């Protein structure tokens, strides 16, 4: 199963590299905004794939910095950052499909964030894997909110509506 996982990550990396190459090569075919979306999708996707490879191939628990054992806080921070990056990649991929959907994507990410926070607040015991899925949804929604909020503000400024 790890072999299939690595093959799928390699194919995803190839697809994101194609997005990046397509953004650079399609100067006349795509508008500037769409090229930026394609380029950011490719860049974030490649970073996400690289972080995923790093996470699964490098044993975070046994290696150390300068002879010191890594504290678990660093491992947790790396995993949260990796999931937020994956959420941003998901949002940018959705914006490739539907470039004008920044407001809808922002609404979806805020709804997912609020739902996951409500589930965490009413959580009154150990749920096992449900807690990990709730935290994953929380991280993905934060990652999705950042690019969709930026593109929503850019749309607002471009149409002369000013800032919030």
Image: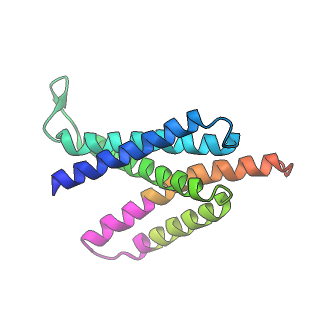
- Is any part of residue 164 visible from this angle? no
Q: What x and y, as percent, mark residue 75?
A: 27, 43
Residue 133 part of the magenta-drawn span: yes
Q: Give whichever of 9, 163 is nearer the camera.
A: 9
Q: What x and y, as percent, mark residue 88?
A: 49, 50
Quadrant occupied by the N terminus: bottom left
Q: Is residue 7 left or right of residue 28?
A: left
Give the main secondary structure of the magenta stretch.
helix
Q: What x and y, as percent, mark residue 81?
A: 40, 45
Q: What x and y, as percent, mark residue 47?
A: 40, 39
Q: From this view, report whether residue 103 is shown above or below residue 18.
A: below
The answer to which image quadrant residue 101 occupies is bottom right
Q: Give whichever of 157, 114 is nearer the camera.
A: 157
Q: Give whichever of 100, 65 is nearer the camera.
A: 100
Residue farthest to the right? 160
Query: What is the count of numbered marks?
Result: 0
Q: From this view, report whether residue 87 is shown above or below residue 123.
A: above
Residue drawn at x 67%, y 61% as measured from the top left: 103
Residue drawn at x 47%, y 68% as measured from the top left: 117
Range drawn in magenta? 119-138
Residue farthest to the front? 29
Q: Is residue 125 left or right of residue 18?
A: left
């Amino acid at each position: 199963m790890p072999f299939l996982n690595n093959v799928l990550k390699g194919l995803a990396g190839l697809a994101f590299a194609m997005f990046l190459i397509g953004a650079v090569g399609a100067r006349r075919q795509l508008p500037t905004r769409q090229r930026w979306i394609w380029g950011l999708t490719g860049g974030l996707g490649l970073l996400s794939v690289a972080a995923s490879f790093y996470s699964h191939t490098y044993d975070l628990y046994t290696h150390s910095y300068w002879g010191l054992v890594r504290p678990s806080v660093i491992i947790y921070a790396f995993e949260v950052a990796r999931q937020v990056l994956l959420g941003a990649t998901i949002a940018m991929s959705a914006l490739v499909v539907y470039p004008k959907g920044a407001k809808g994507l922002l609404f979806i990410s805020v709804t997912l964030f609020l739902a996951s926070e409500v589930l965490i607040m009413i959580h009154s015991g150990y749920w096992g894997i449900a807690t990990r899925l709730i935290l994953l949804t929380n991280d993905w929604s934060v990652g999705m909110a950042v690019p969709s909020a930026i593109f929503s503000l850019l749309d607002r400024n471009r149409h002369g509506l000013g800032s919030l």
